Image: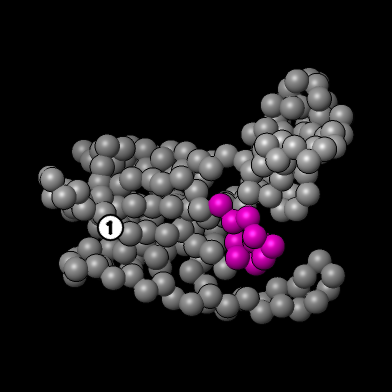
Amino acid sequence: VDLGDGVVRVVVHAFVEPNWKRANHISSGGTPLLFTRDGVGIISGNDAAQAVLEKLQDSPTIALKLIRREAIEEILSDQSDDAAPDSGGDVEYENRTGPGSGDADAARKINELAIARASGLRTGVDLTTGPISCRDDAILDTSDATTRFVQSRVAYSWWKEEKTGKVALLLQSPSLVTPISGVRSRGSGCTFCKVVAPRTIIDSDVFQF
């Protein structure tokens, strides 16, 4: 975040993550680590629907590091230099600033933008009203949240409305907010999430449903 001339400028860090199964990593303390993740067992009663899910799951995702919305609001209100007060056991305050806090729809909103972008690039197809529906984020808030986030991926599943028989692709992203322990200072904190790429939606066969 840059406040040099009174204007907030935020840099988003992003990279394309392939559908990996094993990855070597060096921890901040210099310890070599090996991350692994199993394939996702996706089951659908329809062969075509099953093929779409498997294709989506095998596609790369976009991993993002964002400044938290609350931090920007605090910076704009000139409170970023103030340390967060002692919660004094205030559970509500800790829930708003500690582990598991933050927006539960941060990644969902980005996914919706990706779907709108895919619709714009795919002439004659409007995906913003179906057949894709984005769920709120799967927020990781346990002590092993960092490892779980590294191993996580965007989740896809089919949902069928009983009355109309219409089907929709449900999409849910994992997200992680920092700090993952303790109460954060004002003007600090990030949101990490993995989201779908517009090209992934375009290249899928979800348009047929």
Q: What element carries label 1?
A: strand
Q: Find out whether residue 147 is within the magenta segment.
A: yes
Question: Which residue occupies the foreground of this view, 158 or 141?
Answer: 141
73, above or below 50, in the image: above
Q: Position of residue 184 (x, y in %)?
A: 78, 42
Q: Is residue 126 left or right of residue 69?
A: left
The residue type indicated by label 1 comes to Trp
Q: What stretch is highlighted in magenta?
A: 139-150
Question: Which residue occupies the foreground of this view, 56 or 150?
Answer: 150
Q: Which residue is drawn at 69% across and 62% down?
A: 143
Q: Which residue is drawn at 75% across and 20% down?
A: 77
Let me know if residue 177 appears in the view: yes
Q: Position of residue 193 (x, y in %)?
A: 57, 51
Task: List the residue tagged with mark 1.
Answer: 158
Q: Position of residue 50 (x, y in %)?
A: 25, 68
| Image quadrant assignment for residue 39 | bottom left
| Image quadrant assignment for residue 6 | top right
Q: Which residue is drawn at 67% across and 33% down?
A: 70
Q: Find out whether residue 198 is within the magenta segment.
A: no
Question: Which residue occupies the foreground of this view, 96 or 74?
Answer: 96
Which quadrant: the N terminus? Answer: top right
Q: In this view, does 168 lie to the left or right of 140?
A: left
